Image (tube, rainbow, N blue to C red):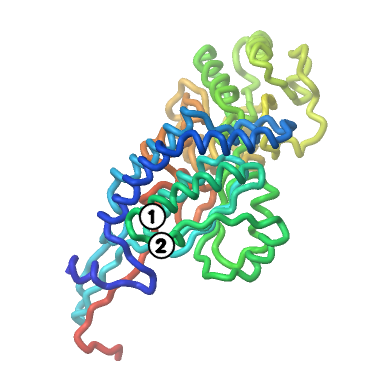
Amino acid sequence: MENVLKNRNSTMELLSTETKNKVLESMMKVIDKNRSQILQANQADLDAFEREDQALYDRLVVDNAKVDDMIKAVGQVREQADPVGKTISQRTLENGLEVVNQTAPFGTIMIIYESRPDVTIEAAVLAFKANSKILLKGGKEAIHSNKALVECWHEALKENGLSTNWIELFTLNRQETQAFLKNPSQKLDLIVPRGGEQLIAFVKEHAQCAVLVSGRGNNFAYVASDADWEQAKKVMINAKTHKISGCNALDKILVDKDLPGLESKLQDLEQVFTAYQVELLAGDKVLPYLTSAKKISSEDIWYEEFLALKACIGLVNGLDEAIGKINRYSGGHSSTILTSDKNKAARFMEQVDSAAVYHNASTRFTDGGQMGVGAELAISTDKLHHRGPLGLEQLVTNKYYVFGNGQIRE
C-alpha cells in the first residue's frame, strides 16, 4: 500500500526525499561559499536604511553569526523526516473501500515579510522540504540581501537539476502586490504575512486564497499575589529586553493588587526597567507608586504591540480579571503567569486564549527552535490548521486516498 501511494502523483511534481535533501546539502555549502557576497549585499541594505525604526533595523542586520544560523537552519531541516506522504489514518469500511488519509503538499505558498533576510532561507527551506513552491515577497529595505540569498537557492537547485521556479523572489511595490493578490498570475494555495498589523490587514483585505496570520505579539505577564518576586522580575526583564524586535517580547504587565509589598515591588521593578532603558507607561492605580512612568493616555494602548523598549503596567483584582484583560487586548500570541500556585497556573493556562501559555517562564521561548520544532515558517496566531510555531511537520495539508473495487453508493 505504501509503495502504491508514493507512486500516485498529484498535478504538481513530487520530489523524493533524497532529491530534496541533496538540494539542502548543496544549499549549506553555497551559503557558506557566498558568505562575503551575502554580507556585502546586506551592508548595502543597511547603508540605505533610515534608522527611525530600531526594531526593523535590528531585523535587517545579517552578520557572520546570522549566516551561520541560516546554514544551521537548513541542516536541521535536512535532518528532519519528510512530512509528505505520512499516513494519518487507514481503515477498511464494511463495503470494502480502503480509506487512507495522508499528508500532502500545500502547493504554492506566498510569504510576505518585512526586513529579516533570514526568512528568505528559513521559509523557503521549510516549504521546499514540504514539497511546496514558495513565492517570497520581501520588503524593499532588504532587497539586496534577499536577491543574494535567492541566488544561493537557485544555484543549489540547478546543481541538482531542478528548476529555479521552486523558489521565486517578488520585487513588487505596494500597488503591484495588491494587484497580484487580487488577481494572481499563478495559483496560490496559502499566503503567510509576517509583519505588523497594517501588513496583515492589507493581505487579508486583498487575498483571494487562505491567509495564515502570524507575527503580532502584544504579549502579557500576570504577576499573581503569591509570585516569587525575584523569579518574576527575572522572567519579566528577559521577556521585555532580551530581543525587543521579537514578536514574542513582553509588552504588558498586570500586577495583582494583593501582591504583598506592592508599592516597594513596583518601585523595584521600575528601577530595574529604568536600568535597561525601558520606558514605562502606567494606569491610574499604578502611577502614584512610580516616579518616572508616564500615564497611559488611551485605553487603545493596551492593544498595541510595541517592538520597542516600552512596557505598560496595570493593576488587576485577581486571576479572573487578569484573564479577561489578556483575552480582550492581547494578540493571542504568548502569555505568562508568575505564581507559586500550580492550580492557579493551570486555570490561567486553560482559559487564556493565546497560542502559547507559560507558567513562571519568559514568553521569549515561543520560537520553533526553542520549542523543539526546529526552523519555523511563522508563529501562527490563527486557530485553523495550526497554532504556534509553524514548523516542517505543520507545513502540509492532507488528502484522502480511497481504493475500491467497483463500489457504488446505494
* Residue occupying the far right of the picture: 297
Q: Could you give the CA–CA distance between mark 2 and mark 1, rounded to whole angstroms?
A: 7 Å
Tell me whether the residue at label 2 lies in contact with that at label 1, contact meaning CB atoms closer than 8 angstroms: yes
Quadrant of the drawing holding the C terminus? bottom left
Using the image, determine if residue 367 lies above or below residue 184. Answer: above
Which amino acid type is marked by label 2? Ser
Q: Which mark is residue 239?
A: none
Characterize the local packing of mark 2: few (<14), some (14-19) or many (20 or more) Cα atoms within 10 angstroms. Answer: few
Identify the residue at horizontal 65%, vertical 57% (top origin): 172
User: Mark 1 falls on what kind of element?
Assistant: helix
Is residue 347 something one can see in this rendering?
A: no
Q: Quadrant of residue 68?
A: top left
Which circle's residue, 2 or 1, is located before the other in the chain? 1
Using the image, determine if residue 287 lies above or below residue 175. Answer: above
Residue 303 percent across, percent down from the top left: 70, 39
Asked whether 326 or 216 is in front, the reply is: 216
